[in-house]
Image (tube, rainbow, N blue to C red):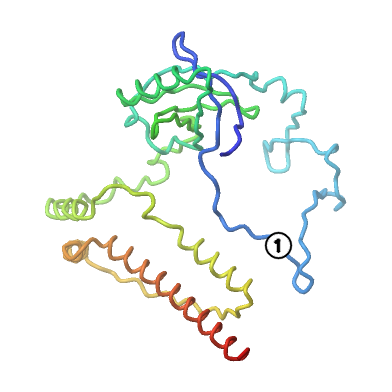
Amino acid sequence: MPRPIWNGTVSFGLVSVPVKVVTATKSQDVRFNQLEEGTGARIRYRKVSEATGEEVPNERIQKGFEVAPGQYVVVNEDEMTALAPKASRMVEIEDFVDLDDIDPIYFEQPYYLAPDQAGAKAYRLLVEAMSELRKVAIGRVVMRSKESLVAIRPLDGVLCMETMRYADEVIPAHEVVPEVDEVPAPSERELEMARQLVTALSGEFDPQKYHDEYREQMVELIERKAAGEEIVAEPQVEEPGKVLDLMAALEQSLARAGRGSAAGDRQQARAAKRGGKRATKSAKATKKKATRSRKSA
């Protein structure tokens, strides 16, 4: 079990619930180090002055905010400390809201809140009350010297706390995609066919169904190279895009959905491909083993 990164109390009204904050996710990204070709030596980074080209020790490094090209306002550590939020072990709930009222764009990083044994009953009381009413608690927490807006919601019988973005951190969609309002409205027939297609492809969300295929292929490549296998990369050829009439695309998609969902077809094809690769790899291993056995005989 991951170690707690913060201990504190969730408070609503006069009720206090002691909790421990535990990370709810883990990165599975494939991370590479940079190496020098030929020697295999690690490449390291140094903090170098742009003016002198010499390395600068940490004690001589300041923080500056760029107010104009090449012009900075320097803020020292004492000034930053004076403005830092006061450390607190309390998450005071300010509001209870409906989960449907919060757009996922506001959610940032999830954590689990594990109950302290001294407050286990109060913890379960909060979980059950929020689950029954389908409510999410909104509050603030100071964690790692930073104050964050948080949403606390019941998830599989425990409390999940997610740090949130503030409203001014979210760019309004119309500022980024203003031309969407100028697109002609779809016809009623197009809309009806789109509804049918969405309905045909609808199902329950199963997170286990989806895989990071790039990461899986990268891990397989690393394992094969580590085992001494020589890999010849095939050049990627991009297929020319097909321009389809919208109605034709909807009709073809609906016909395909009638034979089995397009998503299902893709998932089956990918699973078959992965299975084929594993079978080929297993066959190669068996062949090598047989060859070694004949040589030893």
Q: Residue furthest left?
A: 189
Name the secondary structure under disc 1: loop
Q: Which residue is mark 1?
A: 34
Tell me the quarter of the picture where residue 63 sits: top right
Q: Quadrant of residue 146?
A: top right
Question: Residue 193: x and y, percent?
Answer: 15, 55
Q: Is residue 125 left or right of residue 257?
A: right
Q: Position of residue 187 (x, y in %)?
A: 15, 52
Q: Position of residue 174 (x, y in %)?
A: 37, 41
Q: In the visual, does 238 lie left or right of 230? A: left
* Quadrant (top left, top right, bottom left, bottom right) of the N terminus: top right
Other residues around mark 1 within 10 Å, as few (<14) / some (14–19) / many (≥20) = few
Q: Which one is nearer the viewer's eye here, 69 or 187?
A: 187
Question: Is 59 on the left-hand or right-hand side of 115?
Answer: right
In the image as oriented, which residue stretches furthest toward the top? 14
* Foreground residue among 93 and 225: 225
Q: Say if 256 sits above or below 20 in the image.
A: below
Q: Residue at x 50, y 19 (%)?
A: 10
The number of numbered badges drawn on the structure is 1
Callout 1, which amino acid?
Gln
Question: What residue is at 73 percent from the left and 43 percent from the top?
Answer: 70
**Residue 231 falls left or right of residue 272:** right
Residue 297 % position (x, y): 60, 91
**Of 113 and 186, the residue lying toward us:** 113
